[in-house]
Amino acid sequence: MALLEVKKLTKAFGGLMAVNNVTFKIERGEIFGLIGPNGSGKTTTFNCINNFSPITSGDIFFKEKSIKGLKTHKICHLGIGRTFQVVKPLSRMTVIGNVTASAFCRVNTIKEARDEAYRVLDFCNLLKEKDKLAKSLPIEGRKRLEIARALATKPELLLLDEIAAGLNLSELDEAIDLIKRIRDKGITILIIEHIMKVIMTISDRIHAINFGQTIAEGTPQEVANNPEVIEAYLGAEYAQG
């Protein structure tokens, strides 16, 4: 049984077709990569999955039940968490305050929320930063905080949107390790990433889109060797070579 099925997903903004008839399935326990050039419709696909942006047509199934049209917070309660490409923590709150607020998605008391926040921050190697204001963290810390906030909602499926952007090489290795540890906790991952070192290292399967349409799906090696993917990223002369 697929944990998530995106079926003939289409999203139009006026006359612009941002996502056009995209279909894929994600099995429980997978790390599933979604790639494509800038403007190809990746983040729009994320926005449609959690109804941050309502879909034009098609359907989305989570654990075999349609979530089309559900409110974003209800989709989160069902077990789909996400991060955003542009991180926007509650900047005037502390790191632990940010994660505590997210934990209230699942618990009812401040003690339970605080305890969960401590556990998540420890897992994300942010515990030592817990009393700092979120806005004071460097980009790597804010990316980790974004993940911690999502994990505090206790997702079964986690959507990660370019969490490696802006990181140096050592930080990239730490990000890869964190993603793998999240999967080891039993959380299925759908990830958008431009940095090929990350996406090719961690993904079980990859779905590639361009101009809002599917161009390839398969293992990392299969997708990396696909002529349409090479052309989309590097140009026709490389695909022909």
Image (spheres, rainbow, N blue to C red):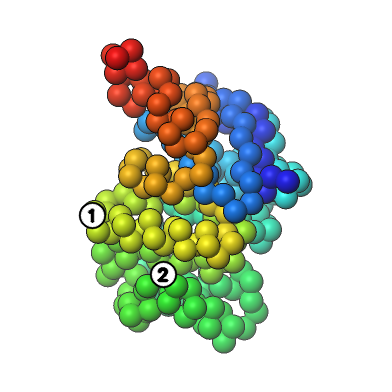
What residue is disc 2 on? 124
Q: Residues within 10 Å of mark 2 (few under 14, many from 20)?
A: many
Q: Residue extending furthest front?
A: 221
Image x and y of residue 177, in percent: 39, 60
Using the image, determine if residue 148 lies above or below residue 118: above
The residue at the point 66 percent across, 40 percent down is 5
Image x and y of residue 137, in percent: 28, 68
176 relative to 208 in the view: left or right:
left
- In this view, the residue in front, 11 or 4, is 4
Amino acid carrying mark 1 in the image: Asn
Amino acid carrying mark 2 in the image: Cys
Using the image, determine if residue 130 lies above or below residue 241: below
Using the image, determine if residue 237 lies above or below residue 18: above
* Secondary element at image label 1: loop
Q: Which mark is residue 168?
A: 1
- In this view, the residue in front, 179 or 131, is 179
The residue at the point 34 percent across, 70 percent down is 134
27 relative to 240 in the view: left or right:
right
Image x and y of residue 170, in percent: 25, 59
Measured Cα–Cα span from mark 2 to mark 1? 18 Å
Q: Residue extending furthest right?
A: 65
* Secondary element at image label 2: loop
Using the image, determine if residue 68 lies above or below residue 100: above
The residue at the point 63 percent across, 46 percent down is 27
The residue at the point 56 percent across, 72 percent down is 103
Q: Earlier in the sequence, mark 2 or mark 1?
A: 2
Q: Can the viewer see residue 221 in this picture?
A: yes
Q: Quadrant of the C terminus?
A: top left
203 relative to 104 in the view: left or right:
left
Q: Which mark is residue 122?
A: none
